[in-house]
Amino acid sequence: MTDIDASAEKVLYASDAAVQMVLALRANEENPESLALWIEVTGSSNNAYTYDIYFQASDETRTGDWNDDRDGLTIVVTAESVPKIRGSVLDLNPDSDQGGMFIENPNRPPRPSGPSPHIAGPPIDLSGDVAQRVIQVLEQQINPSIAAHGGRADLVAVEDDVAYLRLSGGCAGCGMAAVTLSQGIEVALRDSVSEIRRVVDVTDHASGTNPYYETAKK
């Protein structure tokens, strides 16, 4: 890591290169100077936190939110995410093939008490109505899109309001997989299958979790 600003409390550092990339992205937004870069932890996947990173008005901070100003950019970490992100670094992804940015986070989510029943074991019946509608969304909307990057998503199980997916091809081991899941697949499934409220990735990825950007939240 280079050019890290260590002048603020150690919640999140941002490299100069990352700040400049964010400023360039923000310039395409409406009223860019009013927008801060917001970061929050949304969950976890494969022993790493997953993130939601977006532009939102800087004056919408709440008590407990952490913020820092870098070269005209306000960075906000939501209050609930501060202890999970503390000591992290936002920097450019060193893998030029993936591009974008990533968060190097020394913190890890608590491990579950036991292994997921959906990573191994006998096939689970996917003939139910909800499962079939999830499969339809995956085949008609999701897989044609991520196939362009050599990826594929398959349904492993549905329990209550949770869909368990396994990513393969270009998505397996990809540092962008958690973002593909949270910002693309999960949104599409929740919009199309009202019974599904959460999506869990049971892929055994070899690498960590790298976030990318959403446009400004309205």
Image: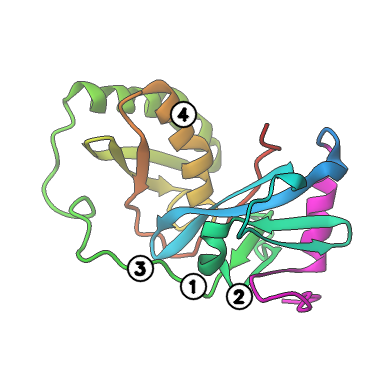
- Going by the numbered disc 2, the residue's amino acid type is Gly
From mark 2 to mark 4, how far is it between C-alphas?
Answer: 33 Å
Q: Is residue 35 left or right of residue 90?
A: right
Q: What secondary structure is found at the residue carrying circle 3?
A: loop
Residue 10 within the segment the image draws in magenta: yes
The part of the chain drawn in magenta is 1-28
Which residue in the structure is indicated by mark 3? 110
Residue of label 1:
107
Instruction: Classify mark 4: residues with Cα within 10 Å, few (<14), some (14-19) or many (20+).
Output: some
**Residue named by callout 4:** 188
Separation (CA) of disc 4 from disc 3: 28 Å
First in sequence, mark 2 or 4: give its number.
2
The amino acid on which the numbered mark 1 sits, given as a three-letter code, is: Asn
Q: Residue at x 35, y 23 (%)?
A: 194
| Amino acid bearing label 3 | Pro
Which comes sooner in the sequence, label 4 or label 3? 3
Quadrant in the picture for the N terminus: bottom right
Q: Residue at x 81, y 62 (%)?
A: 69
Q: How many numbered circles does the render carry?
A: 4
The residue carrying mark 2 is 87
Give the CA distance from mark 3 to mark 1. Answer: 10 Å
Amino acid found under the numbered disc labelled 4: Ala
Query: Mark 4 or mark 1, which is nearer the start of the sequence?
Result: 1
Q: Are marks 4 and 3 in contact (CB under 8 Å)?
A: no
- Where 81 falls versus 15 (above or below)? above
The crowd level at tag 3 (other Cα within 10 Å; few <14, some 14-19, many 20+) is: few
Q: Which image quarter: residue 116?
A: bottom left
